[in-house]
Image: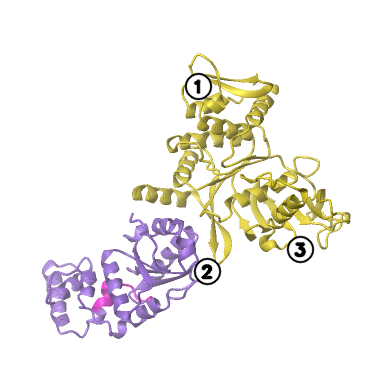
């Protein structure tokens, strides 16, 4: 698990350091301070490319002639860089408690060259504890006139390597804020658990949202696998028809259960969930994250959500939760982390005020 | 525990109790300082939780550029200052190394230990020092001395007892320390208030 992260030259972050990370991390802050951008940066550790526009909600692709789409994509790629500073790479560095480091670097590369090494670094002759490149991936878009956008995503790690896969990437799952969960993806994830006979009981957690639900099954409808639930209406219905809360809960937990040893990113975690169920939702997330050894990064706008998370983890044997607030201070975004005691006092004060 | 009130000004003065609140309100008005907001943290045992709650307010880091904390020394100034340092540390705020010397950071933090950052005592001690030459104080000393002789024991809190006795001699005899400040019963031009005024000007 990461103990700290540092994001450099990405979107609104010139340099953002988030420290004292725990297994479950909740990021709050004012609108447009960069909460979702922080999740996007962490997603770079997946090594998957392109990062944008696939993650952004409303990340609509431009339609129309390729020339216009090229300009759109060009602008979207340039906007990834802080102050549009394309000459410097975007970097996110994650550090484990023992100092072992991982680095994901995203850059605009030269049109015809290979990926460029970080200054001062060589591919070979790297001492133990120094960063060494694991993989590099290039993505190009070219328009009929020959103009090109070329982006390179590289993953680096200090030696000796410890990352989960041979390429240095982490398993990363993303659950967005507003887009409808993918019924197919959820069904696939449930199937992945069933294939390995994983005894994780999703149903117990779904009953937090709707106590009527007695069973769930994946049923193929029109060649599309969809998770159905039985709430005592005489027939099973797709979770999509049983309410946003149920579907949201299933998506969250299935993402965690199928990203073992990796990272799950959840934007606006409270969406679709009534405030009264949030404490139980957080307990389910805490249990699943621990069971599957997942590090969770979630964002929120809601004080109820923060209070519910704090209360849920207070009831656990390990309080492995931290709130990180992003604040714009003198034009620079900084992360301020709040410990258990501070949250306890603040939440008591907040509830009195309410 | 008292909760912090909504932040409206970039300078925050955190004080101990309602008397101190009204006292500092009157002093700031006298000094023409209108860009500082006063927060009452209640009793000294609540300072730590108050600062945690205060620093957690969404507008705190964005809006507040300076925090000044004033508390009584009680019997030992260094211990009183150390307790404030501990409370600041737990709230994740900058920690000054000495009283009345600001710790730079976001926000800047300074601490004043009443009465004067060096002697034991409290806000009452400071106010009494400002009226030392008032004719009523001779009567106050005689009165308190008489009480101690009659009871055979020292007064429970000599500074508070003397303060109440002094205020009993004023035109409105039933005011508390803070109310007395609002009524103009403490001579603001007294030199004993200079260190405190400097602290407030430097906020």
Chain displayed in purple: B
Q: Nearer the viewer, residue A58 or A214?
A: A58
- Gap between marks 1 and 3, in whole Å? 54 Å
Element on which disc 3 rests: loop
Residue name at image x 20 percent, y 73 percent: B180
Q: Position of residue A44 (x, y in %)?
A: 71, 48
Q: Residue furthest front?
A: A65
Q: Nearer the viewer, residue A115 or A162?
A: A115
Comes first in the chain, label 1 or label 3: 3
Q: Can you tell which mark lies on residue B105?
A: 2
Taking the image as shown, residue A206 lies to the left or right of residue B167, namely right
Taking the image as shown, residue A227 lies to the left or right of residue A312, namely right
- Label 1 packing within 10 angstroms: few (<14), some (14-19), many (20+): some
Element on which disc 1 rests: loop
- Label 2 packing within 10 angstroms: few (<14), some (14-19), many (20+): few
Q: Nearer the viewer, mark 2 or mark 1?
A: 1
Q: Position of residue A92 (x, y in %)?
A: 70, 54
Q: Which residue is mark 1?
A: A213
- Gap between marks 3 and 2, in whole Å? 32 Å
Chain A shade in the render: yellow
Residue name at image x 66 percent, y 23 percent: A225
Q: What's the magenta region?
A: B117-128
Q: Which residue is mark 3?
A: A87
């Amino acid at each position: 698990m990461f103990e700290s992260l540092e994001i450099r030259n990405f979107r609104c972050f010139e340099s953002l350091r988030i420290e004292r990370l725990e297994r479950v991390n909740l990021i709050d802050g004012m609108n447009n301070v960069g909460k979702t951008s922080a999740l996007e940066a962490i997603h770079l550790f997946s090594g998957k490319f392109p990062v944008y526009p696939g993650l952004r909600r409303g990340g609509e692709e431009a339609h129309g002639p390729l020339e216009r789409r090229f300009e759109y994509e060009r602008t979207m790629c340039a906007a990834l860089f802080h102050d549009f500073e394309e000459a410097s790479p975007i970097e996110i560095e994650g550090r484990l408690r023992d100092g072992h480091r991982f680095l994901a670097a995203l850059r605009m590369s030269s049109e015809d060259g290979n990926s460029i090494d970080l200054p001062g670094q060589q591919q070979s002759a790297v001492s133990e504890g120094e960063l060494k490149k694991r993989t590099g991936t290039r993505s190009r878009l070219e328009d009929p006139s020959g103009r090109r956008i070329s982006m390179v995503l590289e993953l680096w790690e200090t030696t000796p390597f410890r990352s989960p896969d041979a390429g240095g990437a982490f398993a990363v799952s993303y659950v967005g804020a507003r887009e409808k969960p993918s019924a197919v993806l959820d069904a696939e994830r449930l199937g992945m658990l069933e294939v390995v006979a994983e005894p994780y009981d999703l149903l117990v957690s779904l009953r937090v949202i709707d106590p009527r639900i007695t069973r769930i099954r994946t049923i193929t409808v029109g060649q599309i696998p969809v998770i159905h639930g039985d709430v005592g209406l005489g027939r099973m219905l797709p979770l999509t028809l049983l309410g946003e809360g149920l579907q949201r809960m299933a998506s969250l937990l299935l993402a965690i259960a199928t990203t073992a040893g990796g990272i799950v990113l959840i934007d606006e975690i409270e969406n679709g969930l009534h405030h009264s169920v949030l404490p139980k939702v957080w307990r389910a997330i805490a249990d699943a994250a621990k069971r599957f050894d997942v590090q969770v990064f979630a964002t929120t706008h809601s004080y109820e959500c923060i209070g519910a998370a704090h209360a849920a983890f207070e009831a656990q044997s390990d309080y492995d939760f931290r709130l990180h607030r992003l604040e714009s201070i003198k034009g620079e975004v900084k992360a301020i982390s709040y410990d258990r005691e501070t949250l306890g006092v603040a939440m008591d004060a907040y509830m009195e005020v309410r | 525990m008292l909760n912090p009130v909504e932040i409206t000004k970039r300078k925050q003065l955190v004080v101990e109790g309602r008397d101190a609140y009204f006292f500092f309100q009157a002093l700031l008005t006298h000094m023409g300082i209108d860009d500082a907001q006063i927060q009452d943290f209640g009793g000294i045992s609540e300072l730590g939780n108050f600062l945690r709650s205060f620093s957690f307010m969404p507008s705190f880091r964005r809006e507040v550029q300076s925090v000044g904390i004033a508390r009584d020394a009680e019997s030992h100034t260094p211990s009183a200052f150390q307790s404030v340092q501990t409370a600041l540390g737990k709230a994740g705020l900058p920690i000054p190394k000495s009283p009345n010397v600001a710790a730079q950071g976001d926000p800047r933090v300074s601490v004043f230990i009443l009465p004067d950052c060096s002697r034991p005592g409290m806000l009452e001690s400071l106010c009494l020092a400002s009226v030392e030459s008032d004719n009523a104080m001779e009567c106050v000393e005689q009165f308190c001395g008489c009480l101690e002789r009659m009871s055979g024991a020292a007064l429970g809190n000599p500074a508070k007892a003397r303060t109440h006795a002094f205020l009993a001699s004023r035109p409105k005899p039933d005011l508390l320390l803070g109310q007395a400040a609002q009524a103009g019963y403490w001579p603001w031009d007294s030199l004993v208030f200079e260190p405190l005024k400097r602290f407030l000007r430097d906020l």
